[in-house]
Image (cartoon, rainbow, N blue to C red):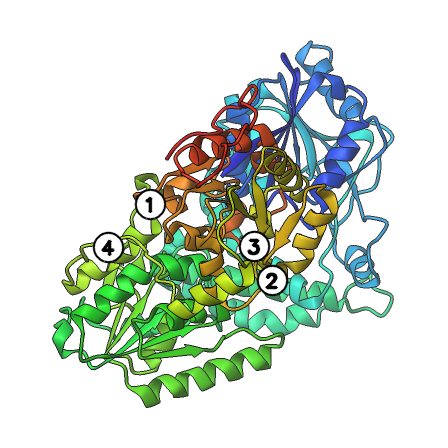
Amino acid sequence: MAVFQIRSHPRPTISVIIPSRDGYARGNVSRLVAQLAEQERIDEAEILLVVGESPNGHARNVGVDQARGRWLVFMDDDAGLRGRRILVELLAPLERSENGEAPALGMTGSATALPEEAGRFQRWVAAALPRALFPEVAELTQTDMAHHLCCALPARVYQEIGRESDTLETGTDVDLRERLRAGGFGIAVAPRTVATHPQPASLGELWRKHLWYGCGRVELDRLHPVAGRNRLQGGRAAVVRYLARAVATAPLRILRHDRSSPWGWNPLRALTDLAQKVGHGRAYWRHLNGLGPRPDPLFSSRRLQGWLSRRVGPPAQAPAPAAIRRMLVILTAGLGDAVTFLPALRALREACPRAHITVWTSRAATAAVVESQGGADEVVCRGLESRSRGGRVWRKLTTLAWLRRRRFDLAVVNFINSNEEIGVLLYLGGVRHRLGYVDDPAHPGLFDLAVRHPPLSAGVLAAERHLHLLDRLGIPRPATGVPIWVVSPSARSRAAELVGGSPGARPVVGLHPGSGAQMSWKRWPVAQFATLADGLAAAGAEVWLFGGPDERSLAADLQALSTAPLRDWTGTGDLDLQAALISRCNLFVANDSGLYNLALALPLPVISIFGPTLPMLSGPWPRPQAAEVVSRDMACRPCVDLLMPPRQIHCPIGMDCLTSIGVDQVLAACRRLLATTTVVGSPGLTLPVAGGTRTGAGTRP
């Protein structure tokens, strides 16, 4: 969903375009970029990394829209380059063709080899399957073995043939070659060019890859019908005849003699042929039933939800809140999400006074929020994940049995997108009504009380989004629709004992350098937090550190880098005690984290440092105390990797959204907000005025 300019050039002649699902490709993207940096003629090139766009043909078109070079060079994100003259050898024949010194040539590609680190199974696959590899050639060779792994085209030719298909899921190499031939252009492998490409590392990967090839071949046959291969034209009867013939001849295809194999039979060839036939047949059948070419796995929550959804009637009438006796609220996100859900939970409690409300979560911090602030009669902490597949199945079965025993009248799911797995569990668990967000209320799946989630562009904050969900039940909005954390008297007295004495004359600034163990990509660099602590201490402030038990090592790193005396409360006590200690600060500075949301629910000024996430979605809500966001506006925000499990970011530009935020910008924000806070006996801070601020930094929400 973003195009990163890895290498820029004021007037490039070559545009290298690398489409990638996640911008990482198991670490290969950085290796490929390093290999490109060593290429001859790279000083004429720009490098564009297209992340999160699919299918691949569409991703390449997106890159071409921003490319400015005369020559387009496409490379897969799992490719490797051998030698330093790849660009030279790919472009030389095209330049001769464009100058009229050779016949019309539309595309040049490289030879294909295995990476040096390829395993034994991958080498077996490469040797057993035709077209898996193509040897290096000494002269320009006309062949259709040039493909997207590493190829070059004139930008003029690419536009002339109508670019690539935006909808073709697989088979884009064949589609591009057909387009070039239809335009009268030749295709060749350039001499002395080798790109490496990994083969499947297991039988499962090999099966899935060729199953997907077979599925995509149906759409390819429809676009480029050859010798009557587009059987969709013959209707259902033609497809049935084809499938019956494929089933009847399957044993012969599996057991056929293969002269290339020393023992006369090639098991991998038989496996891949069978996978492609199965994929081909499934895709034809799905086309005839209007389901599209892409099949779901045989055993998946999406497929099970599709089967069960046929038994669910039209959207249900919302039950009267007073009639609800057993309610389940599912909070599977972290601490921050639980804090922002507090107004909705209190609204549910007020609207359903006779209901027994059970909160189900998989995280201890979320359970601690509900137990501390109330609103629920019971908190159940149980997860569905396990290291083994058998463990996951067992946990889901036990959860299903637990749901059926409890016989809930209503389940409220606060995901921004209520996923299929939860919907299946709630339906099979006998929950009478299921309320949650869906992409399209016309196709709600198993949620009979479906609500369309607000679009990202609407900028609806989390607390407001949770209350919007309850509108489907007719529950009135609370008078105070923002999270408010009530610190218990015992926690206040315990905090006073730990701090000791009366409040000092110096202002206290709390810092939270963490963002939870699972979201470390939200963190402003710890070295910059240390410099910030030094600047605050030098200006006369007392600096306290906060964090959860799993962030003690991070706090220790910060103290090692800082020269200021810091008071460390990381992991001290429970969540209510942390809130009591934070409430004694005059200012709180944090990343986009759970403690940041907790601080916003307390009466003190807060500064938040946002990187890959959007302040318009999880930033500060309207509150009496001042709140400020320090961030940098970038086209790639929110980061595409946030949408991909396991939510780990491998940024191709080094998390520039965070690292480019300067300490002086945050110090300037501290200076502004501390000016709104009165500290008895304090002479005031003399923080330095920030120097040249960067675009998007220091902006107020």
Q: Is residue 395 left or right of residue 346?
A: right
Q: How far apart are marks 2 and 3 (CA)?
A: 47 Å
Q: Which of marks 3 and 1 is in front?
A: 3
Instruction: Look at mark 3 in the image and give the residue it sits on.
Output: 546
Q: How far apart are marks 3 and 4 (CA)?
A: 32 Å
Viewer-proximal residue among 303 and 364? 364
Q: Position of residue 33 (x, y in %)?
A: 73, 34
Earlier in the chain: of badge 2 and badge 1, it is 2
Q: Residue 208 carries which label?
A: 2
Q: Can residue 675 be seen in this view?
A: yes
Q: Which of marks 2 and 1 is in front?
A: 1
Earlier in the chain: of badge 3 and badge 4, it is 4
Instruction: Look at mark 4 in the image and give the residue it sits on.
Output: 468
Viewer-proximal residue among 243 and 217? 217
Callout 3 secondary element = loop
Q: Residue 621 carries which label?
A: 1
What amino acid is at disc 1? Trp
What amino acid is at disc 4? His
> Cβ–Cβ below 8 Å for labels 2 and 3?
no
Q: Position of residue 280 (x, y in %)?
A: 51, 59
Q: Is residue 622 above or below residue 85?
A: below
Q: How far apart are marks 4 and 1 (CA)?
A: 15 Å
> Cβ–Cβ below 8 Å for labels 4 and 1?
no
What amino acid is at disc 2? Arg
